[in-house]
Amino acid sequence: MSVLLSTHKLKAFYGDFQALFGIDFDIHTHEIVAIIGANGAGKSTFLKALTGLLKVDKESVFYKGEKIGGCRTHEIVSNGISMVPEGRRLFPSLSVAENLKMGQFTGREGRWTLDQIYALFPILEEKQDMPATSLSGGQQQMVSIGRALMSNPELLICDEISLGLAPIVIKEIYGALGKITQEGLTAIIVEQDVGTAKSVSQRLYCLQEGRVSLQGNSDEVTHDEIAHAYFGD
């Protein structure tokens, strides 16, 4: 497998405040890599740096061998990176189908069409004409994932997609993510639940205070190692 995206000594700032300190990261094609860490560890900042929501050095982020650090978000999405944001951020005035179609703005061609999204999440076809924000939390998350897929990305970035959902719904959401990656997609997930993160990913990175405190194969790192990586000595 080839490296799809990587960062090299990635630093990020909010004004004079430094939030990331030299992050080295990589993900290979068809992998699921999890990002874990306590609140304030830098997980969301890292995703913002990858997706152009935060200005970073051009040579600190590479995608398919090209420098994309500091590129605008719409350029990054057009190149095949799509994000499922924390909190879903659906358009309340639009129906389920209309929200899904918003993901088509890039014009990228690929397998993900409205019919394919409905095949992945059949409940959305039943509710396609309903306001998206009238759905349950889990169903809204399906819409958010579907909208991201409609841009036909090569890399899907998921920020806390299990937040606030019941365990049975989380299992369904991650089951769908597994199907997506089996069909060739690559995914980065930020996940609050360590057990879930380990079970759905091949590798993981733990961040602590803006630095990588642990990385390894998800089925090999121990809970003691993770606890130490979260909180230090």
Image: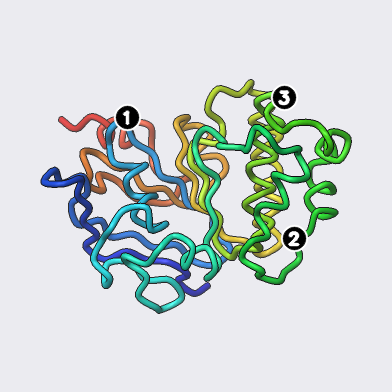
**Distance of mark 2 from mark 1, alpha carbons?**
34 Å
Q: Position of residue 25 (x, y in %)?
A: 34, 59
Number of residues whose C-alpha sits closer than 10 Å to that of mark 3, classed few (under 14), some (14–19) or many (20 or more): few
**Residue type beneath disc 2:** Trp
- Callout 2: SS: loop
Q: Amino acid at mark 1?
A: Asn
Earlier in the chain: of badge 3 and badge 1, it is: 1
- The mark that comes first in sequence, 2 or 1, is 1
Q: Which residue is disc 1 drawn over?
A: 39
Q: Nearer the viewer, residue 134 or 164?
A: 134
Q: Residue at x 31, y 37 (%)?
A: 225
State if disc 1 and disc 3 touch (CB < 8 Å).
Answer: no
Image coordinates of residue 80 in percent, x first then y, are: 55, 67
Residue 122 lies, in percent from the top left, at 85, 40
Structural crowding at the residue carrying mark 1, measured as other residues with C-alpha within 10 Å and reported as few (<14), some (14–19) or many (≥20)? few
The CA distance from mark 3 to mark 1 is: 29 Å
Mark 2 against mark 3, which lies toward the viewer?
3
Which residue: 72% across, 52% down? 101
Image quarter where the C terminus lies is: top left
Q: Residue 89, which numbered label?
A: none
Residue that label 3 marks: 134
**In the rendered image, the vertical position of residue 203 relative to residue 57, given as above or below:** above
Label 3 sits on what residue type?
A: Ser
Judging by the rendered image, the residue that carries numbered circle 2 is 112
Proximity of marks 2 and 1: CB atoms separated by less than 8 Å: no
Circle nearer the viewer, 3 or 1: 3
* Residue farthest right in this picture: 126
